[in-house]
Amino acid sequence: MPISDRLLMGPGPSNPYPEVAQALAGPVLGHLDPEFLAILDATNDRLRQVFATANALTLPVSGTGSAGMETSFVNFVRPGDPVVIGVNGVFGERMCEVAGRLGAHLIRVDAPWGTPIPPDDLLSAHPNPSIIAVVHAETSTGIRNDIAPLGAGKGDALLLVDMVTSLGGIEVAVDEWNVDIAYSGTQKCLGVPPGLSPLTVSAAARERMVERPSSWYLDLNLLSRYVQSSAEGGRVYHHTAPVTMVAALHAGLGAILDEGLEAARSRHAECGHLLQDGLEALGLKLFAQADHRLPQLTTVEIPSRLPDGTTEADCRQMLLSRYGIEIGAGAGQLAGKVWRIGCMGHTARRRNVLALLGALKEVLD
């Protein structure tokens, strides 16, 4: 089956919106071209709408969601800073790795994978943390962590949130939740290929930025001077922006905003519930705790009995080779135990869910 016909329903890239494909095929502008700078400004405005924030420092970082994660830590963590990090999946673990490399005094708060982290556990982990960090939608487990109680109770700490798999798919309210630093990725619910990490930083957090972070490329003191408009004092060149990816993000955000944020979230919810109900109707067991289960990323336990002579990897390969449908393997301690099925961005369509359920039934029979 041609690669172009594949239906991406894994935890990674989703199928792009048609508007995105059109933007990717357009002429390449220079990174200092006034037309591109206008697109960049409009993209930042659209990101503010999707993040639900008025933060002036809101931009797409050059690099995938992991670049957003590193940007969020390297600009705000000093050696010895007490940093509380919630861990209930692979990406909470990754936060710990990044903070540890910066010399943070790491206070790790664990919860069983597949369950949410109690907000009180994070708030009581240290009397005066510099940062409290958590993953909103844990891609490795399909679980949602509560953010609003953390913003309400964080005191003087900065609240840093990974929104890679939540932005555009479930409710995100940066200002209302009192989130100080948030980053995301383009390839999940935004329906844009990987390559950028949307980032937003509050005014309070900007006052506490590291003056000279260890990364020049991800230095927000420099990046902020490139993304500011002429009305704010003019731009200063930093690094060459990935112009085609910014145009693609501009188009993807436009598609979501044209549909309406609430409509897009409702579509994700409807498709996720249809998928999860369908998986249970096939006799499969869902992994994540029901009341915090993500609609856009479903973890399902691999059946103990598979067709004779097949492994779980064989089943995923059959879905791909026979039906052109890609689902994801388990990650971290869930490797070989669950499948991760994405229903994100333009992929979150009823017809795609029904196609996956029909194909999976045939593979497992």
Image (spheres, rainbow, N blue to C red):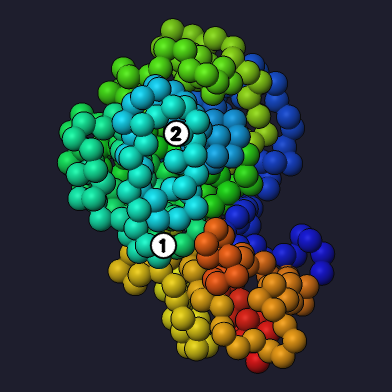
- Give the camera-side residue of 364 and 309: 309
- The residue singled out by tag 1 in the image is 113
Q: Secondary structure at mark 1?
A: loop
Compared to residue 240, the image places residue 60 above or below, namely: below
Report the residue at 50% width, 83% height from top. 284
Mark 1 neighbour density, 10 Å: few (under 14) some (14–19) many (20 or more): many
Identify the amino acid type marked 2. Ala
Name the spot of residue 209 as percent of width and height, x first. 38, 19
Q: How many marks?
A: 2
Q: Residue at x 44, y 72 (%)?
A: 287
Mark 1 → mark 2, Cα distance in angstroms: 21 Å
Q: Circle 2 is placed at which residue position?
A: 99
Residues 187 and 112: in front is 112
Q: Does residue 105 lie above or below 110 as drawn?
A: above
Mark sitting earlier along the chain (1/2): 2
List x then y, in percent, for residue 245. 64, 36
Q: Is residue 93 above or below residue 98?
A: below
Q: Nearer the viewer, residue 328 or 3?
A: 328
The x, y position of residue 111, in whole percent, is: 34, 58
Identified at 69% across, 79% down, the residue is 311
* Residue 273: quarter of image: bottom left
Residue at figure coordinates x 44%, y 30% from the top left:
73
Q: Is residue 64 left or right of residue 184?
A: right
Q: Quadrant of the C terminus?
A: bottom right
**Element type where label 2 sits in the image:** helix
Mark 2 surroundings: few (<14), some (14-19) or many (≥20) residues within 10 A = many
